[in-house]
Amino acid sequence: MMDLLVFMPNIHPIIVHFPIVLIPLGFVVHLVCVFLKRTDDFKIQIGIFYLAATVSSAGAFLSGRQAADTVSVSAQANLVLSDHADLALWTLSISIVVSLLYGLWLRSKFLSFLPWAVLALSLVNVGFLIVTADHGGQLVYRFGTGVSLPKDKPVIPQTIEQVSAIMTNPDGSWSWEPQFENDQNDFSEFYFIEGNSNDIKSDSEKNGFIVISHPVSFMLNKPVADVQVEVILDVSEFNGDVSIFHHYQSMEHYDFLDIFLGKIILGRVENGKRNEMDSKNLQVDGWVTLKVIGSGRHFKGYLDEKLVVHGHAPVFDPGSVGIMLNGTGTLGLKSIETVILKHN
């Protein structure tokens, strides 16, 4: 039993097989009864199949959400995971409608068109189920999601262009690391929304630390869509909040992951209004890895590879990625890594 729990850390792989069987089975049984004109003889059994399919779909959807929040997911797998979640929601929604329409027909036999409407929707649901299951299979067999595998840090492909401390790649991914061995300003290649690169000085006494004299906001002015941003930082001696922002259109339109006074906030600024998707109180000391993922309408925030905040919002247009340092003091900043998420 313990070996099973190691290799299958959640119940989603068990539950998901029930709707995989029950949704097609309900459709086939109903279809056969209609053509054999035996619907009245098996109307209760058909209803039980549809109801069981709906209940099992709900169980698979809810257990899938729980699984997605607990397993390690590689950068590129997040796109497939987001699509899988959206397709699963469609499958559950159609299952609910099918059950309701069939129940309505049982109560009102005068609506003779309803069995055909139920069959049509049930067939559509079989199609959604197939595509949903395919995405789930990709997560497991292509990306190794949810199985006991070594946790590899996402790797940015071999760089072909280096500009100061920023390294860029053909796919649009980029990374930044301070270059202490030269006299260049490590932030000079960024576009500053607030302040300028001269407001950031290297701390001569602490390797990897910078001194912020005024609030600054900077970004690499290259719009991207689905993205993962990972920052290694130490906020112990910084007086203010640090935000990773992405899908930046303007100061009135962007998504963010914010860390301030032991609280991590996942949110969005839209039309100048700040909205929180999720937040969590956490004690953050020393060097930590802060990661945010924006994939479709799905948004996640991680602290040291542990999912801490998760939210949903409509898709924004592609935008830039950057950092907001709203405060002053000494900040540890070892690296910024942006990975573009693309369907292969």
Image (cartoon, grey):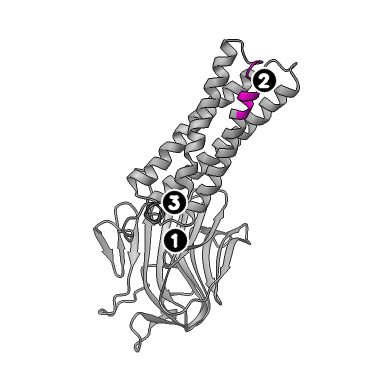
Quadrant hosting residue 95: top right
Residue marked by disc 1: 321
Q: Which mark is residue 114?
A: 2
- The answer to whether the residues at label 2 and label 3 have Cβ atoms under 8 Å apart is no
C-alpha distance separating marks 3 and 1: 11 Å
Q: Earlier in the sequence, mark 2 or mark 1?
A: 2
Classified by dominant secondary structure, the portion drawn in magenta counts as helix
Residue at the spot x=64%, y=32% of the render?
97
C-alpha distance separating marks 2 and 1: 51 Å
Camera sees residue 297: no
C-alpha distance separating marks 2 and 3: 41 Å
Identify which amino acid the numbered label 2 is placed on: Leu
Residue furthest out toward the bottom: 205
Check residue 45 for magenta coloring. yes
Magenta extent: 41-48
Camera sees residue 179: yes
Query: Residue 116, how many percent across, how many down?
Result: 62, 18
Identify which amino acid the numbered label 1 is placed on: Val
The correct choice, above or below, for 146 with respect to 194 in the image is: above
Query: Residue 14, how many percent across, how many down?
Result: 46, 43
Residue marked by disc 3: 226
